[in-house]
Image (cartoon, rainbow, N blue to C red):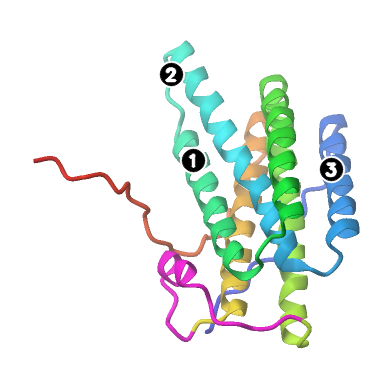
């Protein structure tokens, strides 16, 4: 497949103490991931996408409650953040099909989700700007990780298996699509989330908002409820 290549050079240079703290925190998480998973990128994706799906839901919830209290418009933030959470969850559902997590990794997923949820919830209450900057840096690292994953596939160290059915349906990929195609569209998604969250942080800080990379088109997930009579 001929897929567009996102801008891999995008990096928000930390400006001020909160940005520096956010950047250092994400780099510490990156060190832990590199130490624990090494080059097992499929397993890394399973655990990290579990964490990545948390910020959008937390941000949407707290923004929703803030708008109710203040009786004001959200300017599209809630829908954007909910879409991000759903998109990251679909990344997880896809990589579960590629890298079957062990019992220990499932425990790590459970522990990481609760620890990160509580941490991020508290951070968002205290400083939404810092919270979005954390996610922006987190997504920068995700783009880098998926770029490394593509190199592993291209160099034959990771099998380029057929794309899972859930991925083909969600992103509208052809039946001939492979894992490499999936990793490419996921990287496109992560570049989009990177720019959106840095943009939110900039908006809250009164800084110029940079252009946002396009996301890959995907299916709209609909609830499976019995139709009303």
Residue at (44% x, 76% y) in the render: 173
Q: Which residue is mark 1?
A: 82
Q: CA distance from mark 3 to mark 1?
A: 24 Å
Residue extent of the magenta highlight: 158-176
SS at badge 1: helix
Residue 205 in view in this figure: no
Q: Residues within 10 Å of mark 3 (few under 14, many from 20)?
A: many
Nearest to N terminus: mark 1 or mark 2? 2
Residue at (66% x, 67% y) in the render: 99
- Where residue 161 sits: x, y (%)? 60, 82
Q: Nearer the viewer, mark 1 or mark 2?
A: 1
- Where residue 79 sits: x, y (%)? 44, 39
Q: Determine whether, in the image, residue 216 is placed left or right of residue 199.
A: left
SS at badge 2: loop
SS at badge 3: helix
Q: Residues within 10 Å of mark 1 (few under 14, many from 20)?
A: some
Query: In the image as oriented, which residue stretches furthest toward the left?
Result: 229
Q: Determine whether, in the image, residue 27 is placed left or right of residue 160.
A: right
Q: Which residue is mark 2?
A: 72
Residue 173 shown in magenta: yes
Nearest to N terminus: mark 2 or mark 3? 3
Query: Do residues under tags 1 and 2 come within 8 Å of each other at their CB atoms?
Result: no
Residue 165 in view in this figure: yes
Residue 49 shown in magenta: no
Residue at (8% x, 41% y) in the render: 229
- Where residue 81 sits: x, y (%)? 52, 40
Q: Which residue is mark 3?
A: 23
């Amino acid at each position: 497949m001929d897929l567009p290549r996102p801008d891999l050079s995008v990096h928000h240079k930390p400006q001020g103490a909160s940005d520096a703290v956010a950047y250092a925190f994400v780099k510490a998480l990156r060190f832990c991931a590199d130490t624990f998973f090494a080059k097992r990128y499929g397993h890394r994706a399973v655990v990290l996408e579990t964490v990545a799906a948390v910020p959008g839901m937390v941000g949407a919830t707290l923004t929703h409650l803030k708008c109710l209290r203040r009786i004001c418009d959200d300017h599209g933030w809630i829908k954007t953040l909910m879409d991000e959470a759903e998109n990251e969850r679909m990344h997880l559902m896809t990589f579960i099909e590629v890298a079957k997590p062990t019992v220990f990794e499932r425990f790590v997923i459970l522990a990481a989700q609760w620890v990160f949820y509580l941490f991020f919830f508290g951070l968002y209450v205290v400083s939404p700007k810092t919270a979005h900057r954390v996610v922006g840096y987190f997504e920068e690292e995700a783009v880098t990780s998926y770029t490394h994953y593509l190199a592993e596939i291209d160099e034959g160290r990771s099998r380029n298996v057929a794309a899972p059915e859930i991925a083909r349906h969600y992103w509208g990929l052809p039946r001939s699509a492979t894992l490499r195609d999936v990793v490419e569209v996921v990287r496109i998604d992560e570049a989009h989330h990177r720019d959106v969250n840095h943009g939110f942080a900039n908006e809250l800080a009164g800084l110029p908002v940079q252009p946002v990379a396009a996301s890959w088109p995907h299916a709209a997930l609909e609830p499976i409820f019995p139709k009303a009579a």
